């Protein structure tokens, strides 16, 4: 009896219909279920990926079917061979252009050398133009007659006499100027050559009276000699020497004469040396 009941009862066999009806009811009441939305999103992503894969397959098929398309390593090899062949052709054409340029340059060099060689010869063979003097104008007869009478009148005038007078005047002026210049030069004082001398006068020992020694040196009076400043310079062992400045006229006083006059004071002076000598 239970078996007969199950045969007539179909609710368990149509269970999915009831589940769908229940899901739709709750979706209308509370919105779609999160699990179902995730399933729908996953399905849309899969469909989108499938559509993209189909587009890529179609594009690849269209590219392979086009002209000049090649697939695999054989296609790449053929493309490389084609590019190498085109480069060789371009290289050959460039070589031809370079050869043409070299030939043109060599021709220009030959022409320039020929022109340089022919230029001096061309200048030598160039005929010189003759200078043609301008035509003289024919004077009228009346002018000739007047000129003849003027020449006759000029013959009576003595031109040489006036030239002689001018030469005498110029000579006199030149002599006068030379005389004035000689007088002016004679009145000008001549330049006197002078020298500045620094003398080192050494005593005999440290007991020598240096004041008396300086007085003896300054007592030397010569024409053209002027004494200057002086100072005592230590030499060593208590001995000091006298350094004295003087100015002499070269034409009147010599260094030998000056040393001879100073060394006459033998009691005080041992020697005289020239420390510095300068022309003024």
Image (cartoon, rainbow, N blue to C red):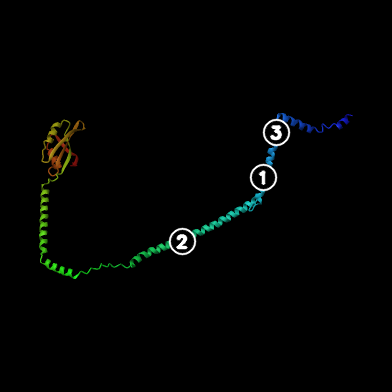
**Which secondary structure lies at badge 1?**
helix
Q: Distance between the residues labelled 3 and 2?
A: 84 Å
Q: Name the residue under label 2.
A: 104
CB of mark 3 within 8 Å of CB of mark 1? Answer: no
* Residue 108 coordinates in the image, percent (x, y): 43, 61
The CA distance from mark 1 to mark 2 is 61 Å
The Cα–Cα distance between marks 3 and 1, rounded to whole angstroms, is 27 Å
Picture quadrant where residue 234 is located: top left
Task: Bin the neighbour count of mark 3 within 10 Å (Cα to Cα): few under 14, some 14-19, many 20 and up.
Answer: few
Mark 1 is surrounded, within 10 Å at the Cα level, by few (under 14), some (14 to 19) or many (20 or more) other residues, namely few
Question: Does residue 63 appear to the left or right of 177 in the view shown?
Answer: right
Q: Name the quadrant containing residue 147.
A: bottom left
Note whether 158 is above or below 229 in the view shown. below
Sequence-wise first label, 1 or 2: 1
Say whether residue 266 is visible: no
**Marking on residue 55:** 1
Q: Residue at x 60, y 55 (%)?
A: 82
Label 2 neighbour load within 10 Å: few <14, some 14-19, many 20+: few
Up the image or down, 230 lies above or below 72; here it is: above
Q: Which residue lies furthest to the front in this view?
A: 142
Relative depth, front residue between 196 and 272 = 196
Residue 37: image tag: 3
- The secondary element bearing badge 2 is classed as helix
Q: Which residue is drawn at 50% across and 59% down?
A: 97
- Most extreme residue toward the right, as rendered? 1
Which label lies toward us, 3 or 2?
Answer: 3
In front: label 1 or label 2: 1
- Picture coordinates of residue 18 (x, y %)? 78, 31
């Amino acid at each position: 009896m239970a078996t007969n009941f199950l045969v007539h009862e179909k609710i368990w066999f149509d269970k999915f219909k009831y589940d769908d009806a229940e899901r739709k009811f709750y979706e209308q009441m509370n919105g779609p279920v999160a699990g179902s939305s995730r399933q729908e999103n996953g399905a849309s992503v899969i469909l989108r990926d499938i559509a993209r894969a189909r587009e890529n397959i179609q594009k690849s098929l269209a590219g392979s079917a086009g002209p000049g398309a090649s697939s695999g390593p054989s296609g790449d090899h053929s493309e490389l061979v084609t590019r190498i062949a085109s480069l060789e052709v371009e290289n050959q054409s460039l070589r031809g252009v370079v050869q043409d340029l070299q030939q043109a340059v060599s021709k220009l060099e030959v022409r320039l050398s020929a022109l340089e060689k022919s230029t001096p010869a061309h200048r030598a063979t160039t005929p010189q133009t003759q200078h043609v003097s301008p035509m003289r104008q024919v004077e009228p007869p009346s002018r000739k007659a007047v000129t003849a009478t003027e020449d006759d009148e000029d013959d009576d005038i003595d031109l040489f006499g006036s030239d002689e007078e001018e030469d005498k005047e110029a000579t006199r002026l030149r002599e006068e100027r030379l005389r004035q210049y000689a007088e002016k030069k004679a009145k000008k004082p001549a330049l006197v050559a002078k020298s500045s001398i620094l003398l080192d006068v050494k005593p005999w020992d440290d007991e020598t009276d240096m004041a008396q020694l300086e007085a003896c040196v300054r007592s030397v009076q010569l024409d053209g000699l002027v004494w200057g400043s002086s100072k005592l310079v230590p030499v060593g062992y208590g001995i000091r020497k006298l350094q004295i400045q003087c100015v002499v006229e070269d034409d009147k006083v010599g260094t030998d004469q000056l040393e001879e006059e100073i060394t006459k004071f033998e009691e005080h002076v041992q020697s005289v040396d020239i420390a510095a000598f300068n022309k003024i």
